Image: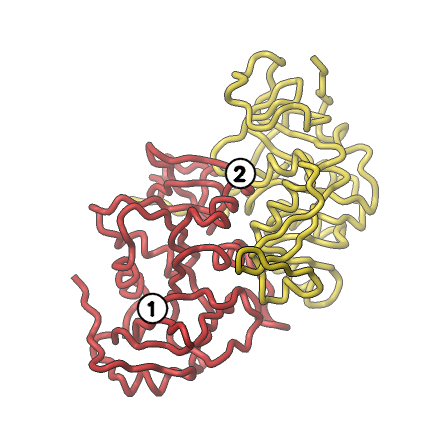
Amino acid sequence: MLTKEQIAKRIAKEVENGQYINLGIGIPTLVANYIPAHLEIVLQSENGLLGIGPFPKESAVDPDLINAGKQTITLLPDSALFDSAQSFAMIRGGHVQLTILGAMEVSEHGDIANWKIPGKMVKGMGGAMDLVASAKNIIVAMQHCSKDGQSKLLPKCALPLTGIRCVKKIVTDLAVLEIAPEGGFILKERAPNVSVDEIKSKTAGKLIILGEVPEMQFD
Amino acid sequence: MINKTVLNAEDAVADIQDGATLMMGGFGLSGIPENCIAALLKRKIQNLTIVSNNAGVDDFGIGLFLKERMVKKMISSYVGENEEFERQLLNGELEVELIPQGTLAERIRAGGAGIPAFFTPAGVGTEVAEGKEIREFDGKHFLLERALYADFALVKAWKGDTAGNLIFKGTARNFNPLMATAGKITIAEVEELVPAGSLDPNAIHTPGIYVQRIFKGDSYEKRIEQRTVSV
């Protein structure tokens, strides 16, 4: 099973040179730590920043510089600042090519639920609905099963949806999976020492296995 | 040059009445109109409808309004940092309309720009789409969303001049410039207030035409929600 850091590390391998990328809160934020230094990429923060710099030194903390997770951050020499309408214009306009976000559930058709548990938790969708409606590539980072052991990869989401037919790839603590155009989770890779049978037993939605499934490789 | 200055926060918000709709700038606690919030708290007005991306935290920002039961309805995109908010919501004491953040921003922008409605892809196939017109353009589905307006927009800028021109700093800009355009009366509080003519016209983010009142805030706490540092 992968740790959160390893999930982030595996997702970082999906990043391509020249991409503008939005990282959600949680594991997706960790992806930034593993993007190879030779790639020229720009991280977008939907509260109004392109070019997210590292966390500041204590002496340089600025309350007027935060990311979408409300963490204090720094600017880079080539950063750009803008307002929230501009921020979502670049998201909806398809200028942000890659969105990496967490999920509570993903369906075998690429539907995603991550903003509400009726009667229990109401936090709101933030920018997630705009992001999943528009990005060209959407990768979900999540645990394969919930804390009580229920599969989060389902035939159909039970929770209120964030977006439909939008997720392209899922990286969990057990596997890398792609959404098949006709529906289903194509098992692409398995975590080290995790068997295909274990993944099968923990995937409630349709799992598609095409030949030998390789183990994930980490550099 | 039209002089928009008022003496202080108390004067600026003196005519805000019970039942008013307020837009309030800020993302999290960054770029919130702290001095207007403090002045409104003293007046304890009620039944407010508040349009704000977030709802503050329990003991700061809009969270203070919630504690004093000043809010009838919140229109927001993310309200996760506020226990009192969640309690009032789950008890049915507070109305809440949750809106995708980009839709919220664009509805405000549209309100200020004379666009009554627009189509967006955000929320198609979700409960956000319920009861809304859906149209297909170029093979993709979009929702019809209406513009938002407010009786008062309360915004916070870094620098401003007596004519109401505003410059924001860092990510404290966020919703402030949009809201400035969508208030019938826009009140701007600034850290530094200078005479008209002293700001570089190239650098102005919000032209003074959108601002009816401006004052220098007495003090800014600028509370940080997630202080993250590197060693």
Give chain B's shade.
yellow
Instruction: Say the numbered circle drawn on residue A95.
Output: none
Q: Is residue A140 left or right of residue B164?
A: left
Q: Amino acid at mark 1?
A: Val
Q: Is residue A59 above or below residue B194?
A: below
Q: Residues within 10 Å of mark 2 (few under 14, many from 20)?
A: many
Residue receiving disc 2: A83
Is residue A208 in view? Answer: yes
Instruction: Say the numbered circle drawn on residue A171.
Output: 1
Q: Amino acid at mark 2?
A: Asp
- Mark 2 element type: loop
Chain identifier, red in the render: A
Please tell me in which quadrant of the rendered image residue B34 appears.
top right
Residue shown at 38% from the left, 63% from the top: A139
Q: Residues within 10 Å of mark 1 (few under 14, many from 20)?
A: many
Residue shown at 35% from the left, 40% from the top: A56
The total of numbered circles placed on residues is: 2
Quadrant occupied by the N terminus of chain B: top right
Quick one: A100 or B106, which is closer to the camera? B106
